[in-house]
């Protein structure tokens, strides 16, 4: 878990630094929770109790456990020209 948390913080810091130094960049990071398919079945059984699942639902912006395919769909949309209406001050 330490590696996951450290990597997550590094990605967030790197992306935020890029946005600060280049205001024309519309960047954001994709950092799903470890429950979003990256944990093994053994890890899920050992560490993810119903209380942990509820805590994750409370602290993330969506009240469901997001799956990898859903993250990929959202990333593809935000990477496409169709998302330009969400970022009116940015030019791609």
Image (cartoon, rainbow, N blue to C red):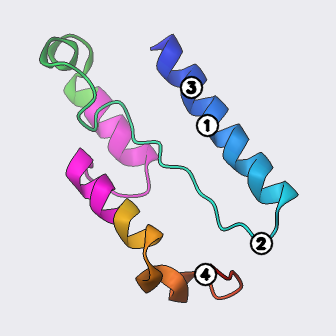
Disc number for residue 7? 3
Disc number for residue 11? 1
Of the two numbered discs 1 and 4 on the same chain, state the one appearing first in sequence. 1
Front-most of residues 65 and 12: 12
Task: Say which quarter of the image contains residue 48.
Answer: top left
Q: Which residue position is annotated with label 2?
A: 24
Q: Residues within 10 Å of mark 2 (few under 14, many from 20)?
A: few
Q: Position of residue 72 (x, y in %)?
A: 30, 55
Q: Position of residue 39 (x, y in %)?
A: 25, 23
Tag in front: 1 or 2: 2
Q: Residues within 10 Å of mark 4 (few under 14, many from 20)?
A: few
Task: Tell me if label 1 and label 3 are in contact, CB under 8 Å.
Answer: yes
Q: Magenta residues? A: 52-74
The residue under the point 25% across, 46% down is 68
Magenta span dominant secondary structure: helix
Disc number for residue 22? none
Give the number of marks. Answer: 4
Q: Which residue position is annotated with label 4?
A: 87
Q: Position of residue 40 (x, y in %)?
A: 19, 19
Quick check: can you spot residue 15?
yes
Front-most of residues 53 and 9: 9
Q: Secondary structure at mark 2?
A: loop
Q: Is residue 76 left or right of residue 9?
A: left
Q: Point out the image quarter for the N terminus.
A: top left
């Amino acid at each position: 878990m330490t590696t996951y948390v450290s990597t997550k913080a590094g990605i967030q810091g790197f992306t935020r630094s890029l946005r600060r130094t280049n205001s024309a960049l519309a960047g954001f990071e994709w950092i799903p929770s470890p429950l979003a398919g990256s944990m093994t079945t053994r890890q899920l059984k050992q560490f993810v109790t119903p209380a942990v699942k509820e805590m994750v639902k409370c602290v993330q912006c969506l009240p469901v456990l997001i799956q990898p395919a859903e993250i990929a769909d959202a990333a593809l949309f935000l990477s496409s020209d169709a998302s330009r209406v969400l970022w009116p001050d940015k030019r791609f």
